[in-house]
Image (tube, rainbow, N blue to C red):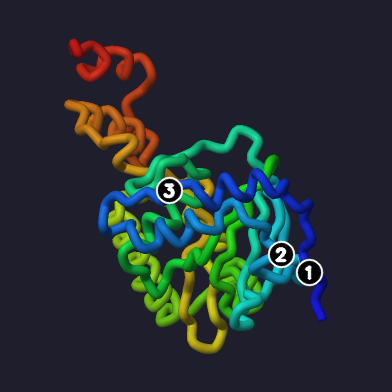
C-alpha cells in the first residue's frame, strides 16, 4: 500500500470559519468548478489523495504518482514551492490563486481538451501548493520518446503530433491562455496510441491580463534583425535610425 500523506491537523475554530465562509458565484462558465475547488482548496491533501512514488523533480518542486481515495483514480500530485509565485483572480472566486492553477482552470473550463492535461483539484499550504492532475498511463515525455526512437520521428509521427499540439494550443488561445514554454519535455505521449498531452503552464500567461497591441513599424524592425542571410540583415548603425525607434508614442 502506498504511504498516505499526513499533514498537521488544523485548529477546529479555523476549520469552522472556513466551512462557514460563503461560496462565491460569478461567471456561469466558471461557476460549477469554482464551487468545487473552493470547497476543498484549504483541505489536507491526504484527506482526498494517497501519495506514491516520485515521478520527477526540478526547480519548481516535485511530482508524485498518486491515487484519488474516493474512486482509485490514478493522478499526478505536483507540489510547487510558492516563493514569489504570481497569482490570478478568476471570475466566480473571491481569493486569488497561483498562476499555474488559474491557467489550468481556464483551459479546463467550461470544456476540456483531449490533448491538454486535466486539473482535478488543488490545495493551498503555507509554503507551497499542490495540484492533483490527470496521470495518463503509460506515458513519457516527448523528449524521452524521441531518444528511444533513435533521436528522431518519422514524418507520419511528426505530422500526427503537430496536429494534436496545434489543436491544444488553439484551445488555450480560445480560453485566453498562452503557454510560452512549448518543448518536448512539456509534452506527454502515450507510446501505443501516440496521443499527446500538453503539460506545465508554470511559464504561461493570460492574454486578458496582458492585452496584445499592434505596434506600428515594430514588425519591420524585427524582420530587419531576423533575415536568414547575414549579409541581408540591417547592421547596428542602420538600426539606430529605424523609424520605429524615433516615432512618437
Residue 85 relative to residue 51: left or right: left
Measured from the top left, where is residue 189 in percent x and y? Answer: 53, 75
The earlier-in-sequence mark between 2 and 3 is 3
Measured from the top left, where is residue 240 in percent x and y? Answer: 32, 14
* Disc sitting over residue 60 in the figure: none
Figure quadrant of the C terminus: top left
Mark 3 lies on a secondary structure that is loop
Question: Are circles 1 and 3 on residues that touch, CB within 8 Å?
Answer: no
Residue 167 relative to residue 138: left or right: left
Mark 2 lies on a secondary structure that is helix
- The residue pinned by badge 3 equals 22
- The residue pinned by badge 2 equals 46
Q: Residues within 10 Å of mark 2 (few under 14, many from 20)?
A: some
User: Mark 2 and mark 3: span between their CA atoms?
Assistant: 24 Å
User: Mark 1 and mark 2: span between their CA atoms?
Assistant: 6 Å
The earlier-in-sequence mark between 1 and 3 is 1
Q: Residue at x 43, y 67 (%)?
A: 116
* Disc sitting over residue 4 in the figure: 1
Q: Residue at x 69, y 46 (%)?
A: 59
Figure quadrant of the N terminus: bottom right
The earlier-in-sequence mark between 1 and 2 is 1
Measured from the top left, where is residue 170 in percent x and y? Answer: 30, 61
Question: Are circles 1 and 2 on residues that touch, CB within 8 Å?
Answer: yes
Amino acid at each position: 500500500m502506498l504511504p498516505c500523506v499526513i499533514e498537521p491537523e488544523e485548529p477546529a475554530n479555523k476549520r469552522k470559519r472556513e466551512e462557514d465562509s460563503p461560496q462565491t458565484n460569478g461567471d456561469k462558465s466558471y461557476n460549477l468548478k469554482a464551487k468545487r475547488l473552493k470547497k476543498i482548496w484549504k483541505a489536507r491533501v491526504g484527506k482526498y489523495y494517497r501519495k506514491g512514488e516520485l515521478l520527477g523533480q526540478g526547480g519548481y518542486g516535485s511530482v508524485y504518482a498518486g491515487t484519488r481515495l474516493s474512486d482509485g483514480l490514478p493522478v499526478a500530485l505536483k507540489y510547487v514551492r510558492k516563493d514569489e509565485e504570481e497569482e490570478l483572480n478568476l471570475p466566480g472566486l473571491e481569493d486569488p490563486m497561483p498562476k499555474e492553477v488559474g491557467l489550468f482552470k481556464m483551459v479546463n473550463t467550461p470544456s476540456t481538451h483531449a490533448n491538454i492535461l486535466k486539473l482535478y483539484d488543488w490545495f493551498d499550504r503555507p509554503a507551497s501548493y499542490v495540484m492533483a492532475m490527470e496521470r495518463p498511463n503509460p506515458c513519457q515525455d516527448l523528449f524521452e520518446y524521441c531518444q528511444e526512437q533513435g533521436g528522431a520521428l518519422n514524418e507520419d509521427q511528426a505530422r500526427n503530433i503537430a496536429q494534436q499540439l496545434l489543436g491544444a494550443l488553439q484551445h488555450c488561445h480560445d480560453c485566453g491562455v498562452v503557454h510560452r514554454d512549448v518543448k518536448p519535455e512539456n509534452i506527454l505521449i502515450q507510446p501505443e496510441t501516440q496521443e499527446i498531452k500538453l503539460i506545465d503552464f508554470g511559464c504561461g500567461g493570460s492574454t486578458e491580463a496582458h492585452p496584445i497591441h499592434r505596434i506600428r513599424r515594430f514588425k519591420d524592425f524585427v524582420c530587419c534583425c531576423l533575415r536568414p542571410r547575414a549579409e541581408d540583415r540591417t547592421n547596428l548603425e542602420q538600426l539606430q535610425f529605424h523609424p520605429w525607434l524615433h516615432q512618437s508614442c
